[in-house]
Image (cartoon, grey):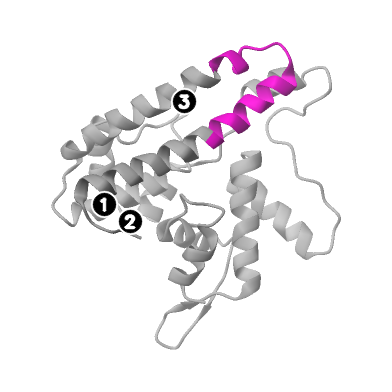
Amino acid sequence: MSIGAVLNVLRDEFPEVTISKIRFLESEGLVEPRRTPSGYRKFSAEDVERLGHILRMQRDHYLPLRVIREHLDAMERGEAVALPLVGRQRTAEDAPAALEGPTVARIGKAELLAAADIDEGMLKEWESYGLIAPLEDGAYDAEAVTVASLVAELGRFGIEPRHLRVMKAAADREAGLVDQVVAPLKRHRNPQTRAHAEARTRELAALTMKLHAALVKTALGVRLP
């Protein structure tokens, strides 16, 4: 399959996945599609299955790419491996605390620049507008690759970062609304209830994104895929 066909297959389960994200995972050596003589990528069914497995581990278990790579390598060697734990090893006693702060997949600045094909000046400008923000340790959430790639792509149409502040503000308001709904669940003493809050957050996030997309389509008065 072409990379576009792979994107269509994956979007059924992962609506936020982009071509840039697939290319980034390839650049990290997590998937190696065949190349035609003219340089086009051709993905096998096994490649697509592997991509789905990677995206699932990122989404559901917050595993960083290094850990995912080690896990997949072990599976390829035929080893029976459980999903690894990230951060401090969890026990029954401290499971509630672990549920409150899942580890987020992250990348370094150099990885972000390479994956999004941007320079430091562009990244600094986008950070000044709040479109991208580093984590406390200076690394970035892996989703920053998607944001950076889309900002760069919009720039080719003449849409500048300053124009996108209104979109960032709208996203913050939508996130605030979702957080307001799930806040009582997050504060609950029962660890299972707090885990349910995380699942509910994903569900509400998906619904708000679909609604946002539908409203944009309606406002533009055009049919979009």
Nearest to viewer (mark 2 / mark 1): 1
Q: Earlier in the sequence, mark 3 or mark 2?
A: 2
Mark 3 lies on residue:
178
* CB-based contact (under 8 Å), mark 3 and mark 2: no
Q: Label 2 to label 1, Cα distance in Å? A: 9 Å
Above or below: residue 182 compared with residue 60: above
Where residue 193 sits, quadrant-wise, is top right
Q: Residue furthest right?
A: 80
Name the foreground residue: 113 vs 204. 204
Mark 2 lies on residue:
117
81 horizontally vs 176: left or right: right
Under circle 1, the secondary element is: helix
Mark 1 lies on residue:
152
Under circle 2, the secondary element is: loop
Residue 103 has which mark?
A: none
**Mark 3 is on which residue type?**
Val
Coordinates of residue 33 in the picture (x, y in percent): 55, 73
* CB-based contact (under 8 Å), mark 2 and mark 1: yes
Coordinates of residue 59 in the picture (x, y in percent): 59, 43
78 horizontally vs 146: left or right: right
Above or below: residue 87 compared with residue 112: above
Which stretch did the figure color magenta? 183-203
Q: Residue at x 36, y 60 (%)?
A: 225
Name the foreground residue: 186 vs 152. 186
Reply yes or no: does residue 147 show up in magenta: no
Q: Residue furthest left?
A: 158
Coordinates of residue 203 in the picture (x, y in percent): 55, 36
Q: Residue at x 71, y 57 (%)?
A: 72
